[in-house]
């Protein structure tokens, strides 16, 4: 093979190798950028759905917390939620208020720090199932009154403000637990109990109770 042809082939090979290296480098950079962007944006995590729309009207809700004094175990402060068309979204808004804790120094937080609501499900019979993270049990100080305050802060806040919810069933870590932290039973759904609060029943709740089964069926 003539010398000039050999030189030409060598030059072409070198050029091809350089071009290939450049191409591989560009592809590597693109892949890195894509991976970084996927990590930052985490497209595999479904976006958080808003709990209400801008057109939903605000409504006042009573959020129950342990009281610092008096004869009642729980008292309530007013909070604002928005009247979402979805009952579950209104329930989640109320639970957010419970998680945030009270604004008054005359009340205490009812949920241990870092407690999360992992899931919420509403049955057609009016029972709401709430799955709390294990933190609600692990970080709880325990004691009968403390456990009652935590449980009925949740139960009363939901049932008082959302008459469609008749009972609350609390799950922990995705499973049914016998007690919250050794005292209060969680095996059955719980109904509103205002006897441990200083809050009077809503007028429509009182009317329904006084009417009895016959009155409610009319």
Image (cartoon, rainbow, N blue to C red):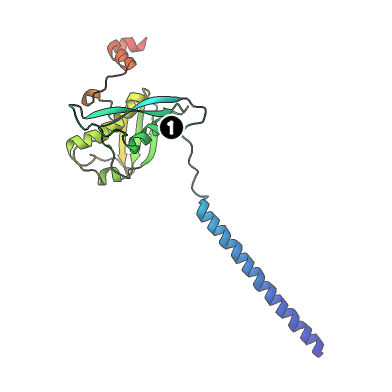
Asked whether 166 or 73 is in front, the reply is 73
Residue 18 as seen in the image, left or right of residue 183: right
The answer to whether residue 1 of the structure is visible from this angle is no
Mark 1 nearby-residue class (10 Å; few <14, some 14–19, many ≥20): some
Query: Percent from the top left, x then y, of residue 72?
Result: 20, 27
User: What is the quadrant of the N terminus in the image?
Assistant: bottom right
123, above or below 48, in the image:
above
Query: Percent from the top left, x then y, of residue 81?
Result: 41, 29
The answer to whether residue 112 of the structure is visible from this angle is yes
Q: Tell me the quarter of the picture where residue 24 sits.
A: bottom right
Residue 212 as seen in the image, left or right of residue 88: left
SS for dot 1 = helix
Q: Residue at 27% across / 34% down in the picture?
A: 105
Asked whether 78 or 24 is in front, the reply is 78
48, above or below 60, in the image:
below
Asked whether 126 or 180 is in front, the reply is 180
- Give the residue pinned by disc 1: 89
């Amino acid at each position: 093979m003539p010398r000039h042809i050999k030189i030409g082939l060598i030059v072409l090979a070198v050029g091809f190798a350089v071009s290939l290296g450049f191409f591989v480098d560009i592809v590597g950079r693109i892949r890195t950028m894509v991976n970084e962007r996927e990590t930052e944006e985490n497209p595999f995590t479904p976006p958080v759905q808003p709990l209400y729309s801008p057109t939903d009207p605000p409504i006042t809700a009573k959020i129950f917390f342990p009281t610092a004094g008096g004869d009642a175990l729980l008292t309530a402060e007013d909070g604002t939620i928005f009247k979402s068309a979805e009952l579950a979204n209104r329930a989640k808004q109320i639970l957010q208020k419970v998680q945030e804790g009270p604004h008054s120094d005359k009340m205490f937080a009812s949920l241990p720090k870092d407690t999360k609501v992992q899931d919420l499900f509403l049955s057609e019979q009016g029972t709401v199932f709430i799955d709390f993270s294990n933190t609600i049990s692990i970080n709880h100080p325990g004691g009968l009154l403390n456990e009652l305050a935590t449980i009925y802060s949740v139960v009363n806040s939901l049932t008082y403000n959302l008459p469609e919810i008749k009972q609350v069933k609390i799950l922990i870590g995705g499973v049914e637990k016998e007690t919250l932290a050794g005292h209060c039973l969680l095996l059955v759904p719980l109904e509103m109990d205002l006897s441990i609060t200083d809050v009077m029943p809503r007028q429509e709740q009182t009317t329904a109770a006084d009417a009895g089964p016959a009155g409610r069926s009319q």
